[in-house]
Image: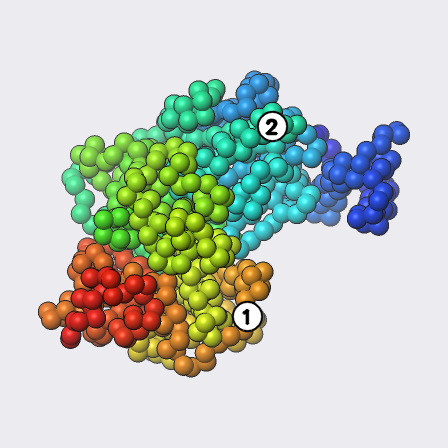
């Protein structure tokens, strides 16, 4: 589809005329939708007749064109300059230079594996090539991304390139946000959102092409999509709308994908990667956080102004602590002659408007340096301009599940060599760059070549639940790397105990659980809350647990004491979950215009609370869809909430032994209460925890005190479980 620029006064007149034609056409369509009329005359061609669906698609194209013209006229020149900049940049991309060849290959092959080096332009350009040259007028193209920030930023970028508003021709769908409508033809989604779409609409009939991007990351949702998309493609092979599948990866593991799709064609795209000088630590590093911090300021004193840094860290708390430390040291008078440091952060739970700040360039002639502190989000997909230096801590936070102990833990681990190369490549997107690795060459050599696919190290409860929701057998599912039989059996046991399955078949409870974009345990406590009269409270708690910590932790010693005093009014003597609930209740009572200052006064993270609020609305929408009673609250009687939490997390229990050490009931593993818990320094006999975090030692996070007598009413077959009998008979 050509994108025409209207700029002259004559063209403006044409625009206005077409605009009123559009209004008339829209009214005509509105009046006929649902009626028996199915034939229209196309007002932009001579005497061509077509049915309502075709009319709607033609209307889509007209509306998109007019939207872009209206936007050009109404916006200032800087926006037009930006569009021109993107247009000029696109012309030099390797993908654009091979456009004709790519079109031919996509048309010829039902599945194509594209290996694109960093800077090749594959993620932004190939969806446009497919839409403009491959698909029919009633077909959409969907592009999956492992992370929310990538899906959003890519959609924003492509919408600029084609000069339409986000949500018109180009849109995105991520958890709790939908920026698409029935006019959207190029859709960027997180892999989890397309997976949920496939559960609801098994043939994916709206899509003529599915692009699985960043396939090398091998998230559990992407691996599931491999099997689902392959199955859909086979079922539509001989139909009138066959499905094109494009798998895109930035690393050279193409053979695995090609073999999986039946010896699919592989295409290699040369990127625009510049020379990168890599430096390793001279000796093995023990305290990577400290050494990363020191390296930042050593390089800051040496590097030219406007040469920006990208620093890889493991999570939000670590990033915020580093940002605070940088801001504190940056006040040193000895640094006044060096560029001003502008710290930007990037992690999954950061609100969209904050995430997009990392893409904003410095002001012209500004004597400054941008330092971006990011999790592994910045490894792939997102393009950060101005980066000359990458500082890689060499660590990543991953969730691991051990079927033999039923232990689900969040651990900080070494990255793989492939991830190290991806991180280094961020420094060479625009010009020659430098990568400083906070690990020795020996430590690099000891890293695994590739990361372990998530599906081989995670709890498969949600995986099995989603496969069953599509009427498929998890044991026979076509995994690209099949999980162990023990892991699948463990998932069935968990789902059976939650009441989601019986004899390996979904129950009514199980079908309801599939409607929630949540871990099955969280879905279970929401559904159980009806029986305890606390749905409003449980939805609030789950919403807060869907984001990162709502309590500000990156504080000076003086402000830490102020924060503790401010948080006292929210504290609960029996539960972190109740403390979260009391905080969220207070936040929701504050007027919108006062929320920001209220959060500042109470040392709360406004961004995370806003995300939790959006999550709450979507979860309540699902509850309404399931005809569950909305608005139930137990007020200040918190025992029903604690009992309800037990219905989903009865596997996550620990008790205090005679040596005052906590032992997990199932894994028999020694652990401690996390220092951030309101119960830290207290020793309740029996506790429920939401997750285990393994750093120097295992810590239980988000704790609630449980009366062990409740187990008799809540835990399935408690009398047949030896571990629970040990707990019941234990004494403090």
Please indicate, yes or no, whether residue 46 appears anywhere in the rendered image.
yes
In the rendered view, would you say 546 is above or below 293? Answer: below
Q: How is the image coloured?
A: rainbow
Residue 475, located in which quarter of the rendered image?
top left
Q: CA distance from mark 1 to mark 2?
A: 43 Å
State the residue at coordinates (31%, 76%).
574
Q: In the rendering, at what x and y percent does residue 299 appear?
A: 30, 43
Q: Residue 629, which numbered label?
A: 1
Locate the C terminus by quadrant.
bottom left
Sequence-wise, the earlier of marks 1 and 2 is 2
Locate the N terminus by quadrant.
top right
State the residue at coordinates (88%, 29%).
46
Residue furthest front as drawn: 503
Q: In the rendering, at what x and y percent does residue 342 appear?
A: 42, 52
Which residue is label 2 attached to? 242
Residue 41, located in which quarter of the rendered image?
top right
Residue 677, located in which quarter of the rendered image?
bottom left
Q: In the rendering, at what x and y percent does residue 718 appear?
A: 27, 65
State the residue at coordinates (11%, 71%).
658
Please indicate, yes or no, whether residue 313 appears anywhere in the rendered image.
no
State the residue at coordinates (39%, 32%).
480
- Looking at the image, residue 242 sits to the left or right of residue 359; the answer is right
Q: Secondary structure at mark 1?
A: loop
Q: Do callouts 1 and 2 mark residues in contact (Cβ within 8 Å)?
A: no
> Are there few (<14), some (14-19), or many (20+) residues within 10 Å of tag 1?
some
> Are there few (<14), some (14-19), or many (20+) residues within 10 Å of tag 2?
some
Q: Nearer the viewer, residue 597 or 472?
A: 472
In the rendered view, would you say 147 is above or below 717? Answer: above
Q: Nearer the viewer, residue 387 or 152?
A: 152
């Amino acid at each position: 589809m050509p994108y025409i620029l209207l700029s002259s006064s004559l063209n403006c007149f044409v625009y206005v005329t077409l605009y009123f034609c559009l209004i008339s056409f829209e009214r005509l369509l509105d009046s006929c939708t649902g009626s028996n009329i199915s034939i229209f005359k196309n007002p932009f061609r001579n005497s061509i007749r077509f049915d309502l669906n075709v009319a709607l698609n033609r209307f889509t194209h007209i509306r998109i064109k007019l939207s872009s013209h209206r936007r050009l006229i109404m916006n200032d020149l800087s926006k037009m300059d930006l569009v021109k900049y993107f247009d000029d940049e696109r012309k030099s991309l390797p993908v654009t230079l091979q456009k004709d060849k790519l079109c031919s290959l996509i048309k010829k092959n039902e599945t194509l594996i594209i290996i694109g080096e960093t800077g090749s332009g594959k993620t932004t350009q190939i969806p446009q090539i497919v839409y403009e040259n491959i698909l029919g007028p009633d077909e959409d193209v969907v592009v999956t991304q492992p992370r929310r920030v990538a899906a959003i930023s890519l959609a924003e970028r492509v919408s600029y390139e084609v000069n339409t508003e986000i949500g018109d021709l180009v849109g995105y769908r991520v958890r709790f946000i939908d920026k698409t409508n029935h006019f959207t033809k190029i859709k960027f989604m997180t892999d989890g959102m397309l997976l949920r779409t496939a559960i609801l609409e098994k043939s994916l009939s709206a899509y003529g092409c599915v692009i699985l991007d960043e396939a090398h990351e091998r998230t559990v949702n992407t691996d599931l999509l491999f099997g689902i998309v392959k199955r859909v493609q086979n079922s539509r092979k001989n139909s009138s709308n066959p499905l094109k599948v494009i798998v895109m990866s930035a690393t050279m593991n193409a053979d695995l994908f090609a073999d999986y799709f039946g010896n699919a064609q592989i295409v290699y795209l040369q990127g625009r990667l510049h020379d990168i000088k890599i430096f390793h630590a001279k000796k093995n590093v023990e305290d990577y956080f400290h050494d990363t911090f020191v390296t930042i300021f050593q390089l800051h004193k040496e590097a030219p102004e406007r040469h920006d840094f990208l620093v890889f860290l493991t999570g939000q708390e670590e990033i915020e602590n580093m940002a605070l430390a940088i801001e504190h040291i940056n006040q040193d008078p000895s640094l006044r002659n060096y560029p001003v440091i502008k710290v930007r952060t990037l992690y999954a739970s950061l609100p969209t408007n904050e995430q997009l700040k990392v893409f904003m360039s410095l002001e012209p002639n500004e004597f400054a340096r941008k330092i971006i502190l990011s999790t592994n989000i910045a490894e792939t997909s997102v393009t950060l301009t101005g980066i000359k230096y990458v500082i890689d801590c060499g660590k990543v936070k991953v969730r691991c599940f051990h079927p033999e102990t039923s232990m689900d833990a969040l651990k900080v681990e070494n990255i793989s060599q492939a991830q190290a190369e991806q991180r280094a490549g961020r420094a060479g997107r625009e010009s020659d760059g430098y990568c400083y690795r906070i690990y020795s060459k020996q430590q690099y050599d000891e890293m695994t070549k590739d990361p372990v696919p998530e599906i081989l190290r995670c709890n498969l409860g949600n995986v099995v639940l989603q496969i069953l929701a599509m009427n498929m057998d998890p044991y026979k599912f076509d995994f690209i790397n099949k999980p162990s039989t023990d892991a699948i059996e463990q998932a069935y046991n968990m789902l059976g105990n939650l009441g989601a399955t019986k004899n390996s078949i979904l129950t009514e409870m199980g079908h309801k659980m599939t409607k929630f974009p949540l871990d099955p345990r969280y879905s279970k406590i929401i559904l159980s809350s009806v029986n305890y009269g606390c749905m409003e409270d449980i939805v609030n708690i789950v919403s807060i647990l869907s984001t990162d910590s709502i309590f500000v932790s990156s504080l000076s010693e003086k402000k830490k004491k102020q924060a503790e005093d401010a948080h006292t009014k929210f504290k609960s003597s029996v539960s972190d979950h109740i403390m979260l609930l009391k905080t969220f209740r207070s936040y929701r009572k504050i007027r919108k215009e006062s929320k920001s200052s209220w959060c500042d006064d109470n040392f709360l993270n406004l961004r995370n609370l806003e995300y939790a609020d959006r999550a709450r609305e979507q979860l309540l929408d699902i509850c309404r869809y399931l005809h569950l009673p909305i608005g139930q609250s137990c007020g200040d009687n918190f025992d029903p909430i604690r009992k309800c939490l037990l219905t989903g997390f009865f596997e996550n229990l620990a008790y205090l032994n005679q040596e005052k050490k906590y032992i997990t009931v199932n894994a028999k593993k020694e652990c401690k209460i996390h220092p951030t818990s309101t119960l830290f320094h207290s020793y309740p006999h029996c506790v429920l925890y939401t997750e285990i975090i393994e750093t120097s030692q295992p810590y239980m996070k988000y704790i609630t005190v449980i009366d062990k007598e409740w187990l008799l009413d809540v835990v399935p077959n408690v009398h047949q479980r030896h571990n629970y009998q040990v707990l019941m008979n234990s004494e403090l």
